[in-house]
Each structure stands twice: as structure tokens, then as C-alpha cells.
Image (tube, rainbow, N blue to C red):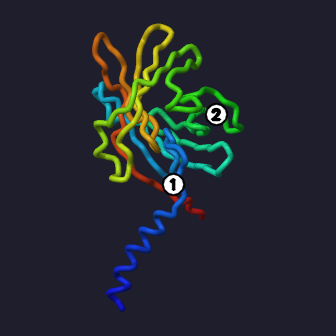
Amino acid sequence: MLRALRLLAPAALLLALACQPRMAEPLYAPWEEGLTLAFEDPSQPQRFSNRLQVRVAKSSLAPGTPRQVQLDLASVRGQLTLTLRVQDGGVALVTPDGQVLGQLLPPGFPATTAWTERGVEYRVLGRAAWSGAALLPATADPVGIWVEARLPDGARRRTLFLPNHGEVEVQELRAADWVTVNRLVSRGFTDLPALKHP
């Protein structure tokens, strides 16, 4: 009897995991509450001291409604809270009351391959496996989508977006070389410290 239970337990666990709700399309933004990402600029000598931490503070993923994600950003320069709306493949930066400040990725992304936002021209370059994928969990998709931005002054920048993580690497064209100026270097889950009341 015990042997039969030991064999059934893994099967029941697999069945329960298979019945979990899944997203219809991949989200190219961080959305899991508590997910904490740290970024560095490898082109700078003080990269560790200038590290940026991004934590998903709140996430609302109710079906049929705009998905809101609150991000808390922290660095040695200070703290900032941003709100994202993730809907129909697009990612928009919004005010807390829902006013769109800017469209980071257009609706229909990645099928939408070219768009313009505030004078910046964007185009999808294609899919690629991220070279830093060793820090991702084994269940994460290491294949993302490169997007190139051409600024009004002619400068060019490209960003790799991974499912469920968003931006993981940014490169700038300097002379004839692509130089990484922002890269995900750490990933984990953190809880906010508990407040102690006197």
C-alpha cells in the first residue's frame, strides 16, 4: 500500500501542475509578485555600486482586464515606482490612474515588427537565445526577441526581451561595435521586510 502511494504522489503532483492556468501569450515584462531583478552596466568600472534593482511589488492579471504591474526600482541614487500595463502583447508605462505615458512594446508584439513611439523608430530584429541564460531557472524560456531602436539623432540601441522577464540586455552602437550598457545579472524572489509596530 505504501509503495502504491509513493508512486501515486508524483503522478498527482504532475497532474496538478498540468491543470494550472497558463497565459495565452507570453508576457514580455516581469509580472510575478516578488520577482527581483538586478541590472548592471558592464561598460562602467563601478558597475556593482551602480546596480539597479527592479522588484515586482504588485501584479494584477485578472482575465479580460488590463494587466497592471507595479515595479519598485532602487539604486544608490534613490527609489522610484513605475506602473506597467501589459495587454494584447503590448507593454505600456502608465500613471497610477491608468494614463499612458509611453508604449514600451506595441499591442500585437512580437507579430508587430515595426512601430514609432515619440519620434523613435523601432523594429523587431528576430529571436535569439540569451547568452546569460545560466542565471535563469530551468523552466524559463531562454529565447527572446531583439528589438532595435533608432533615435531621432541617429543613435541606435537594441534590447533583448525575454518572456516573463522583459528587458534582459541593452546594447548601444558605438563607432562600429555593439556595446552592452545594461544586463540582467541576478534574479530571485524577495519579500518586503515586515513592519514592526511598537
Asked whether the viewer can see residue 171, the reply is: yes
Q: Viewer-proximal residue, 175 or 48?
A: 175
Whether 196 is drawn above or below 154: the answer is below
Q: Is residue 150 above or below residue 34?
A: above
Residue 91 against residue 122 in the figure, above or below:
below
For disc 1, the neighbor class at 10 Å (few under 14, some 14 to 19, many from 20) is few
Residue 57 coordinates in the image, percent (x, y): 55, 48
Looking at the picture, which amino acid does disc 2 mark?
A: Val
Rounded to the nearest angstrom, the CA distance separating label 1 from label 2 is 23 Å
Q: Is residue 82 left or right of residue 137?
A: right
Task: Name the residue: 33% across, 53% down.
Answer: 138
Q: Which quarter of the image is occupied by the N terminus?
A: bottom left
Helix, strand, or loop for circle 2? strand
Q: Going by the image, does 12 lie left or right of 173?
A: right
Residue at which label 2 appears: 94
Considering every residue shown, the one lying at the far bottom of the view is: 1
At 42% from the left and 12% from the top, the residue drawn is: 155
Looking at the image, is mark 1 or mark 2 earlier in the sequence?
2
Residue 48 horizontal/vertical position (percent): 32, 36
- Residue toward you, 89 or 119: 89
Give the residue drawn at x 42%, y 38%: 162
In this picture, residue 115 sits left or right of residue 145: right
Percent position (x, y) of residue 170? Answer: 39, 27
The residue closer to the viewer here, 117 or 112, is 112
Give percent across and percent down for residue 43.
Answer: 30, 25
- Res. 83 visible in picture: no
Which residue is nearer to you in this view: 127 or 154?
A: 127
Query: Mark 1 highlights which residue?
Result: 192
Residue at the spot 43% in from the left edge and 53% down from the top edge: 189
